[in-house]
Image: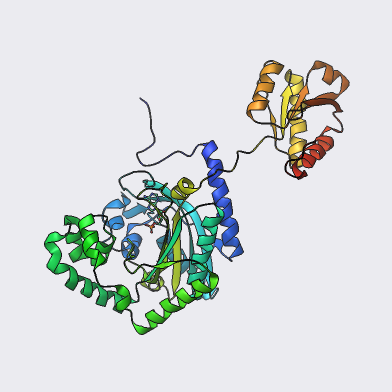
Amino acid sequence: MVFRAVKGMNDILPDEAQRWQYVENVFRQTVHRHGYSEVRTPVVESTSLFVRSIGENTDVVDKEMYSFERHDDSLTLRPEGTAGAVRAYVEHALHAKEPVSRWYYIGPMFRAERPQRGRYRQFYQAGCEIYGDKGPVSDAEMITMLADFLKSLGIEGLEVKVNSLGGADTRERYRQALLDYFRPFAEQLSEHARGRLVSNPLRILDSKDARDQALAEKAPSILDCLAPEDREHFAELCASLESLGTPYRVDPRLVRGLDYYTRTLFEIVSMAGELGSQNALVGGGRYDNLVHELGGPKTPAIGFAMGLERLLLAIPSQPSATETDCFFAPLGAVAARKCLVLARDLRQNGIHAEVDGRGGSLKSLLRRADALRARFAIIIGESELADNTAMLKDLRQHSQQTIDLTTLPQAVAQLVHNTKTQPVGEST
Ligand code: AMP
């Protein structure tokens, strides 16, 4: 029997994991500079948390959750990060401890969707949440932080789309306006959209079906239904984005698959084409009622989630693989033990060192050093052991020298350091 990974769930092997770490590190640095701190919540939560927050008539809750019963509990693998973060915010009464909380997370999410390029059943999201700030200044700052982050990764053809869903009143008025508009065309809608006419008419705007899209083109705009305070909030968001010089497009038909959004809504897509139809890199928006709905005090909030797989598909050039500074090639068991000690000393000096203790000929050891793109190889054989020395080969300059073992860690650390601080293009 041959075991394979579950459909839609992928292994990330070490070669690829380097790219993940790179993106995650840039993300962490970016959000730290903006005052966010990391939160880690469980991957399993009560099913009812997601039903309550994401909404019953959404695709996610309706058909994509991995739920299971355990004793008397109904549990679900988290399909997104916001619900758990809000649950934790309320459970630990963060509102009483600080007026504004800025959180970020990176972790796996699970949705039983039809797998395709850029769409998986286990996928990773990096996201941020701000609690206790009603915006729109923070909204504009969050959107700009994201746009700058994506640009810094070299992703081209980015488009920032923004919209406002207003508050509950606006949503209800708009729902009615959409019903009035779509009902006469019910026969022309796709079957899926006809179902949505009853359950969630806003999502018809989001349909990928050409018939629905054609009708949605002329549907009323939510921006015409906004209450005056919502309209002002949205206008200020746009003005802040303009002062930050962040290009954006107002898309009155932008809606999202989760029910909790209010007011500001945004999406960042990559138009460069690598992603095909799954080109939404980031989705986010305000959810000013959710903290209260989940048992906390009235607390405005905004957040986004970004799919890391899609980000990695969209990044053009990859950072080069790490190179080994020093490769130890011991000839024999006694030499191998010496090398272990020397390598540990070097690592304590911040040097990347590897010891090949598998034995074999010098030739085969040096082949391995080349494969690892090692800068230096340190060879210890019988004659070196007798002299308490090592042969140091510079594999790029093709030179070699004998070094006394007592001074080796300092001498090699200095050499590696010098090669790293050399200006690009110069060599020793
Ligand atoms: P959502 O949580 O649905 O608003 O999605 C936010 C972002 O997560 C999307 O823009 C994608 O980048 C990513 N995403 C959502 N679902 C998937 C999936 N099934 N596979 C990969 N990435 C996803």
Residue 17 is situated, as x and y percent measured from the top left of the image, at 53, 41
| Front-lying residue, 157 or 203 | 157
The one nearer the camera, 372 or 275, is 275
Instruction: Choose top left, top right, bottom left or bottom right for residue 53.
Output: bottom left
Task: Please state the quadrant of the image where ligand 1 appears.
Answer: bottom left
Residue 192 versus residue 313: which sits nearer the camera?
313
In which quadrant is the N terminus drawn?
A: top left
- Residue at left offset 78%, top offset 18%: 381
Is 27 positioned to the left or the right of 198 in the image?
A: right
Q: Is residue 389 visible?
A: yes
Identify the image quadrant of the C terminus. Answer: top right
Task: Kindly give the residue lying farthest to the bottom in the view shown.
Answer: 228
Which colour style is shown? rainbow
Residue 351 vs 259, above or below: the answer is above
The answer to whether 40 is drawn above or below residue 179 in the figure is above
Count all numbered tags in the image, as a single digit: 0
Q: Position of residue 9 (x, y in %)?
A: 39, 41
Give the residue at x 34% y 60%: 50
Look at 85% across and 29% down and name the residue there: 405
Q: Position of residue 413 (x, y in %)?
A: 79, 38
Answer above or below: position of 41 versus 17: below
Q: Is residue 311 left or right of residue 227?
A: right
Q: Eyeballing the image, is 369 above or below 106?
A: above
Residue 27 picture quarter: bottom right
Kindly identify the residue that appears in the image at 33 percent across and 75 percent down.
223
Whether residue 92 appears in this view of the structure is: no
